[in-house]
Image (cartoon, grey):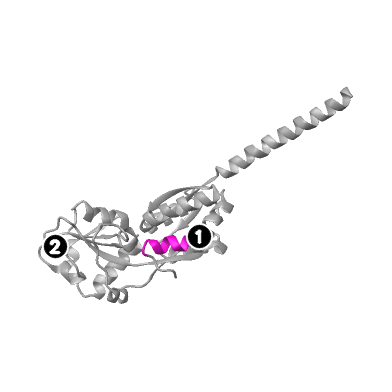
Amino acid sequence: MCKNRKIISLFLLTALVFFTFYAVSLAADQKSSITVAAAANLKNSFSEMGKAFTAKTGIDVTFVFGSTGELTQQVKNGAPVDLFAAADTKSITGLAGEDLIDKDSVKNYAQGSIVLVPSKSAKFQVKYLGDLKNKDVKIIAIANPETAPYGKAAQDALVAAGIWDKIKDKVVFAKNIDETLTYVKTGNADAAIVAKSLVYGSDQKYYEYKAWNQLYKPIVQALGVVKASENHESAVKFANFVTSADGQKIMKNFGYEIP
């Protein structure tokens, strides 16, 4: 009888150890996290996306925001990120071509647009692109067109509208589209051309016109899982969430169209 009790006790102890190990492993999985390099225009939408994803999966998301050009270079340099969400498609397909992004993970997830934002403190309140020629408009901010797709779209629109040569001496280049908005919010620029997603649904005044869509190429955005990621499965889950019905609803809530 005593021997049987010892066997039962040993069995229970073994089961307890196994259960404890399983519980610890499960907790570790639940506390897993990923790092996402995201274009600056995604600052508001992806902050919301991260919260929703974590609530659904238990996987924490840390974002590194910047211009698409800067982030592309960081991925090339081996930065420890798991997924890259760019403000264009060519950056992602280019990295996939260099075998730095998993080709099977590449997805188009949003299409953005640009808007004109006047500074609240500006002497002249711009409403149209042509207003940027006004003598009282001293400084105009756009993102660096060499590294930021939204900056390139802004420059293309100004060129197509026939006013770039008339205003280019007043233009300052911000390092990314979020910094561009900061210029105008702080009164360091009289006007700025920024991503709609950064002001949509806020109390910030902005102007947009359907005719502007003919002035620049559609800003289709793609993402992909970094091939060197140590959290590949979790990164794929995030990519799938962004393009799911729930994820796309969040993108729409920030003024994006679905490509």
In the displayed orientation, state which residue is furthest to the right: 1
Residue 242, percent across and down?
A: 49, 60
Quadrant that contains the N terminus:
top right
- The residue located at (41%, 49%) in the rendering is 64
Quadrant that contains the C terminus:
bottom left
Q: Tell which of 64 and 7 is nearer to you.
A: 7
Give the mark nearer the N terminus: 1 vs 2.
2
Residue 196, percent across and down?
A: 32, 63
Residue 178, percent across and down?
A: 31, 55
Q: Under tag 1, what secondary structure?
A: strand
Judged left or right of residue 36, residue 139 is left
Q: Under tag 2, what secondary structure?
A: loop
Residue 11, percent across and down?
A: 80, 32
Q: Is residue 185 on the magenta stretch? A: no
Judged left or right of residue 95, residue 24 is right
Tag 2: amino acid: Val
Q: Quadrant of residue 217?
A: bottom left
Q: Main secondary structure of the magenta part?
A: helix
Q: Is residue 118 visible?
A: yes
Q: Which mark is residue 137?
A: 2
Q: Quadrant of residue 209?
A: bottom left
In the displayed orientation, state which residue is furthest to the top: 2
Mark 1 lies on residue: 224
- The residue located at (18%, 71%) in the rendering is 130
Magenta residues span 246-255
Judged left or right of residue 131, residue 158 is right
